[in-house]
Amino acid sequence: MTIPRVVGQDRAVATVCRLSAHTLLFTGPDGVGRRTLARWYAALLNCQLGEERPCEGCDSCLAFAYGHPDYLEVRPESATAAGRRARRPEIRIGDLVPRPGGKQLPLSRWLEQRPKFQRRVGVIDGAHSLTHSAANAFLKMLEEPPSYAVIILIAPSQPSVLPTVASRCTPVHLGPVDTSGFEDLSYLPAFRLGHIGPLLQARADPKAARELRDLVEAYVAATKHDLEASFEASDRLEKRWLNGDENLFGVLLERLRQAPPVTYLAASDALDRCQGRLEAYTPSSLAFLELTLALRNLLRPSSGLVATGEGS
């Protein structure tokens, strides 16, 4: 992990540079730079030159290239103990405080250790996923972290976080950014919504981005053909989802925005049902089959959808 560049969030950068709080809450939609700002701020706090931006040349800044000893991220568990994809990913008590069966070095114990450089920076990425027991067990640390520690929580909004947690944090909001210059990626919902993260990721891996775009186009086009073609396209979509592509449903929904409003709303509902079934551990093949049949009924040529991908 190198020191990232914060794009389009000058106000948030200026805010964190003025703050002296030890517990911060970064809010905003996913993809606007909350994690990027957390990593950048950690680099700034530990930079040995002590300037307005990380120098990127001192021992501390260089350490971000291979894993900084004073930076730790805690994320929701994405899989259950049985190895299945978690229905609702959670940050559990054992991730934050010592507990039998928990992590060998939970966040609280890690924060208590003296930093190698200047500040220990612990990030709870997905603070809205904290269980009540985890939040309650961590409140003391949120209120009184060590003088050399900074805790950053990341969540979509203040109301999405438990009130007992949010009240102990200094909020920093990050909003949508200008996505001018990314018009070639307009098929990604991030372009319309001002979420810079997925756009930068697509630029970094253009082949994967094009493959996803082409897969979605082929899937939508297949809905006007026979059932066999539709089911083959459904299988390819399912495989992409099984490989963990988080952008799949967003790109598909963005493509369906080309349909008339009534058709788009019905198609959006079909996507929501599919995602709900997947979260409820319905076999993925069945969930995608139901989605495909629903979209075939909605996206026939008479519905007005441009199935060939024009304008995408």
Image: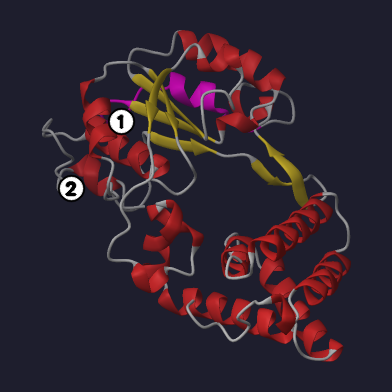
Instruction: Say if 81 sits above or below 264 in the image.
Output: above
Q: Is most of the magenta stretch helix, strand or loop? A: loop
Rendered view: 22 above or below 58: above
Q: Residue at x 80, y 55 (%)?
A: 273
Query: According to the image, label 2 marks what residue?
Result: 56
Q: Amino acid at mark 1?
A: Lys
- The residues colored magenta run 103-119
Q: Secondary structure at mark 1?
A: loop
Compared across the picture, whether 185 is left or right of 239 comes to: left
- Residue 225 part of the magenta-drawn span: no
Residue lying at 62% horizontally and 76% vertically, measured from the top left: 216
Quick one: label 2 or label 1, which is nearer the N terminus?
Answer: 2
Where residue 147 sits in the image (x, y, percent)?
A: 34, 12
| Kind of element beneath mark 2 | loop
Q: Mark 2 or mark 1: which is in front?
A: 2
Question: Mark 1 packing: few (<14 Cα in 10 Å), some, or many (20+)?
Answer: few
Nearer to me, 116 or 142: 142
Q: Position of residue 225 (x, y in %)?
A: 77, 90
Residue at 38% across, 45% down: 176
Q: Position of residue 79 (x, y in %)?
A: 73, 48
Residue drawn at 57 percent across, 39 percent down: 75
Please say whether residue 46 is visible from this viewpoint: no
Cβ–Cβ under 8 Å for marks 2 and 1: no
Q: Nearer the viewer, residue 64 or 178?
A: 178
Q: Residue 167, can we see it?
A: yes
- Please state the horizontal and vertical placement of residue 260, each as a whole percent of the image: 64, 67
* Residue picked out by circle 1: 116
Is residue 28 shown left or right of residue 253? left
State how far apart marks 2 and 1 are (Cα): 17 Å
Q: Indicate the colouring scheme.
A: secondary structure
Above or below, comparing residue 68 to residue 164 in the picture: below
